Image: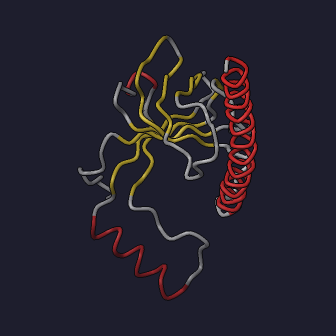
Amino acid sequence: MENNSSRAFIFAILGILIGAIGGFYIGQKYLTADLQKKTDRIEEARGKFPSVEDVRSVPGIVKKIEGNVLYVEAQLSLNPFEDLPPVRQIAVSKNTAIVRLVQKDAATYQKELAVFKPTGNSDQPPAPYIEVPTSFDQIKQGSWILAETTENVKNLERFDAAKIRVQDNLIAPANTN
């Protein structure tokens, strides 16, 4: 009797082990196939978001100013698969051109648009703003800027700016007379 119960116990253990190993193998097979399908779909989606390899300007909001360095919360890339630095340190030197974007008078801008449309004599339509030279101390925390540079800064956390365009708001029209 004791022999039969030992045998039953051994068969039960063997059954559990064979079932667990078989279940693990079958589960692993389906999991791997499902993971491969998902990986293929991600790679297909990645192809629909082309990556820009040469980035020479970074837009964002100034979060902090320390000495001659602007800490800018950069706007996110349109490509969700790119892992770019969220905060950029932009060094400003005496050679950095700094301009403020000031909205043009509506009538002036409309005239420029009217001239542009029929002739098509320019690659770019007229801008709705003018660039007014300003100084570094006019850049404030919360200002929106576009920092331009002469080098590829796609993955750099810190770089030197060649030009900075500042836009606090474009409400007040400029006197263009």
**Residue 113 picture quarter:** bottom left
Across the whole image, how many numbered discs are drawn on residues? 0
Taking the image as shown, residue 118 lies to the left or right of residue 129, namely: right
Taking the image as shown, residue 120 lies to the left or right of residue 114, namely: right
**Residue 43 picture quarter:** bottom right
Taking the image as shown, residue 77 lies to the left or right of residue 20, namely: left
What colour-coding does the image apply? secondary structure
Q: Residue furthest bottom?
A: 118
Q: Is residue 116 above or below residue 13?
A: below
Q: Is residue 33 above or below residue 89?
A: below
Q: Is residue 3 above or below residue 98?
A: above
Query: Which residue is painted at 33% across and 68% down in the image?
Result: 108
Q: Is residue 49 above or below residue 23?
A: below
Q: Residue furthest front?
A: 1
Query: Which residue is painted at 38% across and 42% down in the image?
Result: 167
Which quarter of the rendered picture does the C terminus lie within? bottom left
Which quarter of the rendered picture does the N terminus lie within? top right
Please tell me which residue lies in front, 73 or 144.
73
Please tell me which residue lies in front, 111 or 52.
52
Query: Which residue is painted at 70% across and 36% down in the image?
Result: 15
x, y percent for residue 114: 40, 81
x, y percent for residue 45: 64, 60
Query: Which residue is painted at 37% across and 33% down in the image?
Result: 143
**Residue 83 picture quarter:** top right
Q: Residue furthest top?
A: 67
x, y percent for residue 3: 73, 20
x, y percent for residue 104: 33, 58
